[in-house]
Image: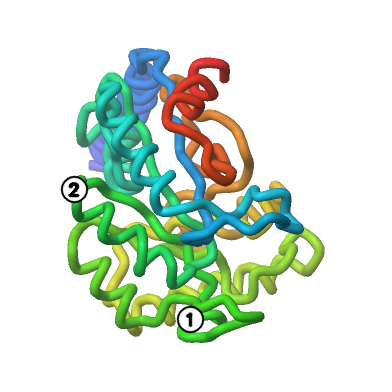
Amino acid sequence: MHKKKMVRIEFLILIILLVVVGFCFYSKHQKEKRTDVKIPILLYHNFVTTVPEFDSDNFNYINTPQSFEENVKTLLENGYTILSMEDLNNVNEGKSELPEKPILITFDDGYYSNYEYIYPILKKYNVKASIFIVTDNIGKEIEGIKYLGWNECKEMQNSGLVEIFSHSKRHIFYDRVPVRELRDDVIESYKLIEKNLGKQELKVFAYPYGAYTNETVRTLKNNGVDMQIYDIGMNNFKTFNKDYVKRINIPCEMTGIEIIEAINEN
């Protein structure tokens, strides 16, 4: 009896090993099958109707609604398919196919102008976008700049066109503080998001100032963050890593054709 039991155990171990090896081989094969396709993610910030003569940030973090609409129209006319972060995650997990010319649109900080000027454009063209909010700023006006309230966030999310994600609680350089502070701030920011907007199946985090370390990436991954956006640059589907996602910053009045040229140059 003892010998038969040992044989059964050894057989079970063999089956488990075969399943693990098979899964690893399948995952490797699926990754090797990935096409060499660029996945640009555009980054916008605040929007103004009149461009000032001077800007302390060299016009990198403001734009106009007219310019944004031109960008969307040009990208659509040139065959780009605008995806959401959820779409990208599903593609990465093999749940859906990647379109020939994918692109994503994101906004950082959670400015009220995203709702006032940009949300109507998203509805007009029926395109998706993601807004990364700083939860400490929700409902506030800081130095004359108004931020989104939870009601605007909820309306946009309920439309099915806009995803709301975390851009932290405090918007600080998180590579300069103990990693537990980042962990706690991101967890707290998502608690607030879920309290006001409902359960979020997909959690994405965009680092303020792109300030990250390998330790912060590991920590957030271990604490339920599905995707992390950390730097300026281009993603490629063949080598895509959801823990190190890159974006292209769109400065004031950059045209759609200039965006396409930037994509092709990367």
In this rendering, is residue 115 above or below 138?
A: above
Residue 148 falls in which quadrant of the image? Answer: bottom left
C-beta proximity under 8 Å, tags 2 and 1? no
Q: What residue type is labelled 1?
A: Ile
Image position of 3 with respect to 124: above or below: above
Mark 2 residue element: loop
Question: Which residue position is annotated with label 2?
Answer: 126
| Residue sitting at x 55%, y 70% | 186
Where is residue 66 drawn, in percent x and y? 39, 48
Q: Which residue lies furthest to the right in this view?
A: 176
Instruction: Characterize the local packing of mark 2: few (<14), some (14-19) or many (20 or more) Cα atoms within 10 angstroms.
Output: few
132 or 16, nearer to the observer: 132
Direction from residue 4 to residue 110 in the image, left or right: right
- Quarter of the figure that contains the N terminus: top left
Viewer-proximal residue, 63 or 23? 63
- Residue 63: x and y in percent read 52, 52
Question: What residue do we see at 36% from left, 19% from top?
Answer: 25
Location of residue 134 in the rendering, given as x and y in whole percent from the top left corner: 54, 72
| Residue 96 in view | yes
Residue 138, numbered circle: 1
